[in-house]
Each structure stands twice: as C-alpha cells, then as structure tokens.
Image (spheres, helix red, strand yellow):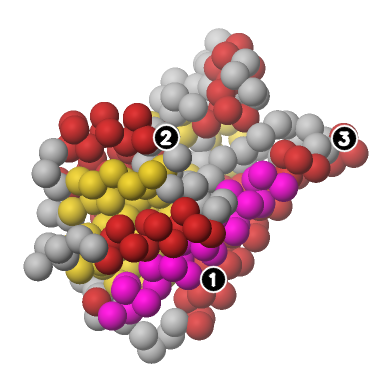
Amino acid sequence: MQNIAVVTGASSGIGAATARRLATEGFHVVAAARRADRLAELVKEIGADATAVECDVTDDDSVAGLAAAVAGLDGVLTLLVNNAGGARGLDPVAAGGVDDWQWMYDVNVLGTLRVTRALLPALEASGRGTIVTVGSTAAFTVYEGGGGYTAAKHAQGALVGTLRLELAGKPVRVTEIDPGMVRTDEFSLNRFDGDRAKADSIYDGVKEPLVADDIADCIAFMATRPQHVNIDKLVVRPIAQAAQHKVHREK
C-alpha cells in the first residue's frame, strides 16, 4: 500500500513546495490548509498522488475532519509535516498586540498539538511513522520585536522535544527543522499585514536567501532516511546569515 504524507499549511510557500517534493518521493500527499482554491490548484498540478483537504488547524472539528479524510484513503499514513504557522507584527513587548500573540500561539503551538494528537494513532499503527515539525531559528534565539513569534516557536520546540521523549520505544520518529531566512511569497507579507515594502525590506541586500524548495528538499531528506535514523533537529540558514543577528547584506 502507498505511504501517505499529510502536509499542513500546504496552500503556499514551504507547505506547497513540500507537497510537490514528497509526491516525487512516492508519497500520496494530503495537502491540508484553509484556502480550498489554492489547494485545488496544487492538487491539479501534482496529479493523482495528491488529495486536498480544507483544514483550519485552529479548529478542533476541522482537524477531526482531516483525520477522517486521511482514514478514508487507500494507503498507510507514515508521515506528518506540521508546517502550518506564521508570524504577525514586529512590535516590542511593551506594545505587543494580544490578538496577534494569541493567533501566533494558536496556529504555531496549539495547531501542532491538534494535528499531531489527531493523527498520532495512525502514525503509530503504521509501524514506521515520522513527524516533521517546521519550526524556526526563532525557536532558540530571540530578537527585538519578535517576542510573540519567538515565544510561540520556543513553545512549539518544547512540544516537539517533549513528544520525542514520550514516544521513546514506539515506532514514530519525531524530528524538527528550524529554518532561518527563507523568502516566500507570503510569510513576511502576512507578518506586516500586506505591506509589501516592509516585507521586502527584510531581504534587502541579501544575495541568496533560502527559498521554499530548499526547505522542502531538507524535509524530504529527513523523512526518507532509514527508519532507525532520527534527525532530532536540523538548523538551516542561507550562507549570508551566520546567526539571527548577523546577516551579510550587499550594497
């Protein structure tokens, strides 16, 4: 039976790139996200090896629907890519917007919890399950204006590390990828509420930031190692970014 991979946040960016790449690796990909129109386009592009499922990871019933849809497919769920997430704002803590912080925590942390909890029984039953969670270098480094996002990503990383301990001895690998500067169509644009100038300024002078396909390539590598190999944490940055605060920008 064909292996099934679920990718959340698959309507754009890293999620869409990962869905495309996993299909070439032989998985039947369940592309899950809120925007059904985007998913339909993606699945049409991938072809028979993909299924679209509209899902909001902040809603319990929606996640239950995702689990039911996966259970109805002809195959074995062996891979979950927790990719849904995002950032809002770049305000200092003293002026932090509670609504923005709440959204970031709900999507990045509780969304990961909801989807993992719903699909874990099937992953364990497969005898060869893998969970890849897309974190960020913000999961272990803070920076001014990033309090809400770094807090959420730190919490998500704690969730992943705890889950790995709790699943010791069971046939499910728990892995984490923490990208640095990745230029996608929407991440920074969403962070700055559609302000294109602010979004583009993040990458000013950076010759080659990472792109979504770079992260998808890493995720595919992590997911296709022999089952006894667990890549606990993979940190990946562009060569121009030596650290969170150290970015080479050309004039």
Q: Disc number at residue 95? A: 3
Q: Relative to residue 165, is residue 226 depicted above or below?
A: above
The residue labelled by disc 1 is 161
Q: Disc number at residue 35? A: 2
What secondary structure prevails in the magenta region? helix
Please state if 228 lies on the left or on the right of 132 as rendered. left
Callout 2 touching callout 1 (CB < 8 Å): no
Q: Relative to residue 136, is residue 79 depicted above or below?
A: below
Residue 204 percent across, percent down from the top left: 55, 17
Please state if 195 lies on the left or on the right of 54 as rendered. right
The amino acid type found where label 1 is placed reads Gly
Relative depth, front residue between 140 and 64: 64
Q: Distance between the residues labelled 3 and 1?
A: 31 Å
Of callouts 2 and 1, the N-terminal one: 2
Q: Distance between the residues labelled 2 and 1?
A: 30 Å
Q: Which range of residues does the magenta coloring cover?
A: 102-125
Of callouts 3 and 1, the N-terminal one: 3
Using the rendered view, name the quadrant where residue 2 is placed: bottom left
Q: Which residue is drawn at 20% across and 61% down?
A: 73
